[in-house]
Amino acid sequence: MSKKMHIQLNVNGKDEEFLAEPRELLIYTLRERLNITGPHIGCETSHCGACTVTIDGKSVKACTMFVAQAHGKAVTTIEGIGGPDDLHPLQAAFKEHHGLQCGYCTPGMITRAQKLLEENPNPTEEEIRFGMAGNICRCTGYQNIVKSIQAAATEMSAAKEAAE
Amino acid sequence: MIPAAFEYHRPTDMAGVLSILEEHGDDARVMAGGHSLIPMMKLRMAEVPHLIDLQGVGGLSDIEIRDADIRIGAMVTQADIIDHTGLADAAPILREASLQIADPQVRYMGTVGGNVANGDPGNDMPGLMQCLDAQFALIGPDGERTVPAREFYEAAYMTARADEEVLTSIIIPKSSGGYAYEKQKRKIGDYATAAAAVVLRKEGTACTEASIAMTNLSDTPVWSEAAAEALLLTEVDEVAIKAAMAAMLNDIDPSEDNRGPIAFKKHVAGVILRRAIERAWSRA
């Protein structure tokens, strides 16, 4: 055991404070310490993207960050994007267009896609595939994931235009 | 995957970093984005009793386009390089290479300083920096010094950087001409089976300057003067390209691993080098 550190995080808008060993991986902090189980552990080796969260405006694989590095930062997980009663357009689109089969990769997919659409609100299919390349799905063959993201992009752009 | 325990340091200036390095010697290591070091620590292939996170140190994330050269801070990420419009004009090969590194999540975190300083033969930036004749700026207890990228790599994970030094920035001379970064990998996120960085300059119909480096085909990047020489004062025709490929194959020393046997790697090296030369020449 190494010396514990005083850690402060803001997760989905809520301030959290606790003592943790600096070597604790952020994905374990979220899932096991804070009971935020949306981000999943797929490979735990920075490849699959199931643990993707947003930190300081960047999509980050939470299996490849020590909790000590995240100290003082704001973290957004799928729980902060939308829930059963207020689905984010991406969540609604994944549901509508069957952008999942087993669903294990979906929280990471949607968290990454949300950031992608923020940076590029009207991506081409190629841009979606390139921007989602850090997220692996072993069921769908990606076709419906791409369709879902395209549908959400259209929906979100229309909503933004209507608001303006 | 639980790494060995460590003490975490987040100094707020370089003096703080250097004093921790001096105090703990071999037991301390600096970390930028952590996307090479953390996986190694998780596998317990690296044990770092004192981990120095550079995120609190200011002044390491700037990109400066100057008259004669470009200075890139060590903590500039691959995503920063891709998004920087001035850099895309001044040195488009950096963007072309960065887009071929890992995946979006890793590019947000992975830094150019970490990529060059780590000394992993699989990293893309070392070969690219040798091709571009970059200089690496290091700071240590005795002050600052620069080391040419072409003299920095000694063996896998062994570089000219001393344990108590930190790589702070990369200085790339501005150049014009055709460029290409070509990479063959098995899948997104994999290191190169072979990758080539090529810069060629054309005057009239002849190639008047050439620089060629390849990645992951030896325990260090391979900047091949002989391969470049084979193209000089030619029209980069089939004979010249074949000569450059032969010269490069003579300079690389790939080893067999899960990317394939030696003969396959040599074959891929030739294919990738040809593509890079042809693309660079088409842009020259």
Image (tube, helix red, strand yellow):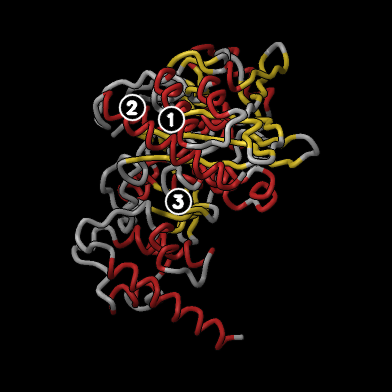
Q: Residues within 10 Å of mark 1 (few under 14, many from 20)?
A: some
Counting residues from the start of the chain, the first of labels 1 and 2 encountered is 1
Q: Is residue A5 visible?
A: no
Occupied quadrant, residue B170: top right
Counting residues from the start of the chain, the first of labels 3 and 1 encountered is 3
> Considering only vertical position in the picture, is B234 above or below B26?
below
Image quadrant where one finds the N terminus of chain B: top left
Q: Nearer the viewer, mark 3 or mark 1?
A: 1
Could you tell me residue A125's position as x and y percent?
A: 40, 68
Is residue B156 found left or right of B56 in the rendered image? Answer: left
Occupied quadrant, residue B199: top right
User: Which residue appears at 28% of the width and 63% of the height?
Assistant: A142
Q: Which amino acid lies under the numbered mark 3 shown in the image of this protein?
A: Pro
Dot 3 lies on which element?
helix
Say which chain tag 1 marks.
B
From mark 3 to mark 1, how far is it between C-alphas? Answer: 36 Å
In the rendered image, which residue does mark 1 sit on? Answer: B242
Residue sitting at the far bottom? A162
From mark 1 to mark 2, how far is it between C-alphas? Answer: 14 Å
- Comparing A73 with B246, the one in front is B246
User: Which residue appears at 40% of the width and 47% of the height?
Assistant: A61
User: Which residue appears at 23% of the width and 62% of the height?
Assistant: A141
In the rendered image, which residue does mark 3 sit on? Answer: B104
User: Which residue appears at 48% of the width and 59% of the height?
Assistant: A14
Q: Nearer the viewer, mark 1 or mark 2?
A: 1
Say which chain tag 2 marks.
B
- Same chain? Circles 3 and 1: yes
Could you tell me residue B117's position as x and y percent?
A: 53, 25
> Considering only vertical position in the picture, is B104 above or below B234?
below
- Comparing A102 with B239, the one in front is B239
Q: Residues within 10 Å of mark 3 (few under 14, many from 20)?
A: many
- Same chain? Circles 3 and 2: yes
